[in-house]
Image: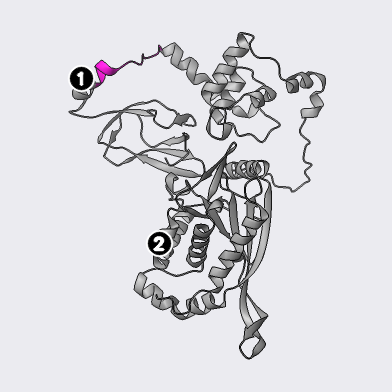
Amino acid sequence: MGEGVMEATVINWLKAPGDTIEEDEAVVEIATDKVDSEVPSPVAGKLKEILVQTDSIAKIGEPIAILEVEGAVNQAEEVATPARTVETPEPEVVRELEKPLKESPAAVSTDSDRFYSPLVKSIAKAEGISGAELDSISGSGMEGRVTKEDILKFVEDKKSGKVAQPAAVQAETKTETSKAVVPVSTSDGDEIIEMDRMRKIIAQNMVDSKRIAPHVTSFIEADVTNIVLWRNKHKHEFQKKNGEKITFMPIFIQAIAKAIKDFPMINISVSGDQIIKKKNINIGMAAALPTGNLIVPVIKNADQYSLSGLAAQVNDLAQRARENKLKPAEIQGGTYTITNIGSFGNTLGTPIIPQPQVAIMAVGAIIKKPAVIETPQGDVIAIRHKMYLSHAYDHRVVDGALGGMFVQRVAQYLESFDLNTPV
């Protein structure tokens, strides 16, 4: 499912028990992070049993269904039987374990911005764990997230009296009004719109990033006249030769990849007190969807592509993002991100860093401006194509000097673009 993905939600079974399935035929739809995708069957056979029901969580590596494969059953049983060590639980136990998945996690609310999976929330509700108690659990998962094992251990320790009541829980008994949510007033004619799943994930990710990383933004104006002139002159020839339209985005990504090589400490992540310096340069590009939501497909090893190769990657990912056809692995593993706010006519922006990256760049609209040009004969005023770059970075590990020099180097690469660059 891609780097860092530990679980997925089953959103729809396309087949029912007893149905015949062809090899590579889609069997189930799942959701992970921001992507919905279909899971194909690796073999032809019959769907014998569904192990993970709709709206339930499946961890990576766990079986979600059993397929009956003609001619291979006896052989599989013969090989698997001696090594089998997992006991099959009684039906009553299975039903007991499934109970928390059917409970609504909405009843457990916390004051923190910490992320909890639907499974953890459902277990908390079933076991009567308050929001304050949930916030007090030390998570062993990625980025400190509370796993199923963490909360079950907490439940066990609580029942045995090993867990002290958190101060926040004690405070709740004194003042319930402190946790009350301030209602939003509505008027006649107001429309109430429920957030869809992707919008909820985006909202949580944005809040998490602002909580985790102290954001600082540096700005610089770049003269991109050469880029505009080159593209206007060669765009038809480029498409005829390479079979791809050439937009400005591949040129921006190429400049960023070059600058990352010059300043590799921009291409890092933070894990506790450790800085992880990334070997690969994987650049994400934020893409707006027809639904109004946002997704960030990633170009892996962006520094290894030619300009035509980057154009092909950008066009392909952008098109499949709009059609909701991205694979989960294609939005994972980004080490730096670019967002084009200029496509909406904006000139400056203060973008939010996608975690666990430490920087993001927003490119603004390209606008004609009068500018002073230095020539051997003296300074002259000419019409130039100008664009602002907004570079937001995590001030925990990226200081103003590095953040400022990086965006300046990107601008220098853009301004020095060669008009004789081959198509």
The residue drawn where x is 52% and y is 80% is 229
Asked if residue 165 is positioned above or below residue 101 in the image, the reply reads: above
Asked if residue 249 is positioned above or below residue 52 in the image, the reply reads: below
| Element at label 1 | helix
Looking at marks 1 and 2 on the same chain, the residue that comes earlier in the sequence is marked by: 1
Q: In front here: 280 or 231?
A: 280
| Dominant secondary-structure state across the stretch colored magenta | loop
| Element at label 2 | loop
Residue 126 can be seen, yes or no: yes
Q: Which residue is mark 2?
A: 305
Badge 2 amino acid: Tyr
Residue 409: x and y, percent? 57, 65
Asked if residue 96 is positioned above or below residue 310 in the image, the reply reads: above
Residue 125: x and y, percent? 61, 21
Determine whether, in the image, residue 230 is placed left or right of residue 90.
right
Q: Can you tell which quarter of the image residue 361 is in? A: bottom right
In whole angstroms, how far apart are the C-alphas of marks 1 and 2?
49 Å
The residue drawn where x is 60% and y is 28% is 105
The residue drawn where x is 49% and y is 49% is 334
Q: Can you tell which quarter of the image residue 19 is in? A: top left
Q: In front here: 254 or 149?
A: 254
What range is drawn magenta here?
Answer: 80-90
Q: How is the image coloured?
A: one colour
Q: Which residue is mark 1?
A: 78
Q: Are marks 1 and 2 in contact (CB under 8 Å)?
A: no
Residue 341 can be seen, yes or no: no
Q: How many callouts does the rendering have?
A: 2
How crowded pointer 2 is (Cα within 10 Å; few <14, some 14-19, many 20+) is rated as: some
The residue drawn where x is 39% and y is 73% is 239
The verdict on residue 85 being magenta is: yes
